[in-house]
Amino acid sequence: MNGKKVMVLGMARSGVAAAKLLSELGAYVRLNDQKTKEKLGDAVKPLEACRNIEWRLGEPAEELLDGQDMLLISPGVPIDSPVVKKAEELGVEVIGELELGFRTAKGLLVAITGTNGKTTTTTLVGEIFKNFGKQTYVVGNIGFPYTAVSGGMKEEDVTVCEVSSFQMESVKEFRPKVAAMLNITEDHLNRHYTMENYAATKARIFANQTGDDEAVVLNYDDAAVQAMAKDVKCRVIWFSRKATPPFGAFVVNGNIVYGTAEEHVQICAASDVYIPGPHNLENALAAAAMTMAAGVPVSCIGDTLRTFKGVEHRIEFVRELDGVRFINDSKGTNADSTIKAVETMNKPTVMILGGSDKHVDFTAMCRIIKNSPYIRHVVLIGQTAAQLDETLKKVGYTNYEHAGYDFEAAIQKAFSLAEEGGNVLLSPACASFDMFKDYEQRGEIFKNIVHGLKSRASD
């Protein structure tokens, strides 16, 4: 990168980290974002001390490409956007932050994608490697940029990377030693247009792997994922909650095992997995398959599965008040993720549902809500409230109310409807951008409001 001219488009966390690394590597860095420096505020302060930085914030991106060797785009910039097309016409190489991280990193790279379960599985795999005594970096879509640490890695280090479909659009050489595809369900069609495009973009995670790489870990229970095996060039290891695959991690007589039906090692009892729900058993099976493939001892994997307590914003217990448990599943940003949260509920539950529109169909999710013995009421919020209203009504579920864009009112309403001994569950099935900066902010605000609630007895 020394002496190269690189324009970094998008000054969120990954863009700032990439620009800082590029500067350290001797590149001439041109910064661009729709927002001005004043509006970006503290976000770009880490770059003020960097050398060879050219500030071109708030200017039209397409007018700044002349003379550049490379355009580095944030995950929020679609690969079919005008600025990317113009860069390609000018012969400017286009990559994303993930690709730069890969090109500058050392050590073992383990990467995880899929529609749901990515953050939990990535964090769990990271914990297993840490408990094995490895210097482990957990990076990517999980919220910590790859490029924030890639420049200082050693050959004996391990990187566990959560990968989104947005990030996969701009990879070229990205090549994990072990890659996992957890599942594929409808999501992000406002960006990828069709399920075929979405699945193909996800599958790029193993496109560069060869027979020299360790493994691809695939979900045997997901037909769309199972079909991807034909394109894999290295060893395929399966995980399955429901069946016995040819080789991989699965359940036998209530125990998580690894190997074949005839010959396998026992990792731990399925009931010993600390984090609840069938979806988390799947996450545990995927994590076990990946880390076994990477040579981690069985005892280390089993111990971590027994003690790992999950991740923030994913079916996270917040507080109990007047016998009502409040659960933060702000990371439930699509219908399938919310289905998994619904299936985890085992007490009367009031749901808060709705958010930013990703142009997906909620029918299957609404049927599961209607048929659940535990979902007693739904409070609708945000941009998708009208669509959810229509879909719930269509499947015959009528116990819902609207709270508009007033998040606090929605929480208060859900609390007022909740039974003693029951739950209030925030699992929106939608992105957060209609009301919040991201799902993390939505979850934090939910927790803050919940912690501020007063007992109904004091009313």
Image: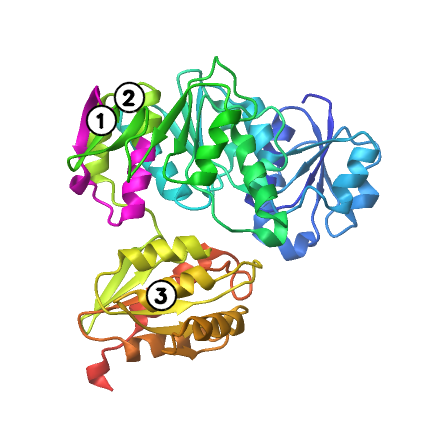
Q: Which residue is mark 1?
A: 300
Density class for disc 2 (Cα within 10 Å; few <14, some 14-19, many ≥20) is some
Mark 3, mark 1: which one is toward the viewer? 3
Q: Does 48 lie within the magenta span?
A: no
Q: Quadrant of residue 2?
A: top right
Give the SS element for disc 3.
helix
Quadrant of the image containing the N terminus: top right
In the displayed structure image, the side of residue 409 where residue 385 appears, left or right? right
Q: Is residue 128 above or below residue 424?
A: above
Q: Does 263 lie within the magenta span?
A: yes
Confirm or deny contact between disc 2 and disc 1 (CB under 8 A): yes
Give the SS element for disc 2.
loop
Density class for disc 1 (Cα within 10 Å; few <14, some 14-19, many ≥20) is some
Q: Residue at x 45, y 78 (%)?
A: 403
Q: How many marks?
A: 3
Q: Is residue 426 visible?
A: no
Q: Is residue 323 visible?
A: yes
Q: Amino acid at mark 3?
A: Ile
The x and y percentages for residue 341 are: 33, 56
Q: Which residue is mark 2?
A: 296
Mark closer to the chain start, 3 or 1: 1
In the displayed structure image, the side of residue 266 where residue 221 appears, left or right? right
Density class for disc 3 (Cα within 10 Å; few <14, some 14-19, many ≥20) is many
Q: Amino acid at mark 2?
A: Val
Q: Residue at x 78, y 34 (%)?
A: 88
Q: CA distance from mark 3 to mark 2?
A: 40 Å
Give the SS element for disc 1.
helix
Q: Which residue is mark 3?
A: 369
Q: Which residues are magenta?
A: 261-287
Quadrant of the image containing the C terminus: bottom left
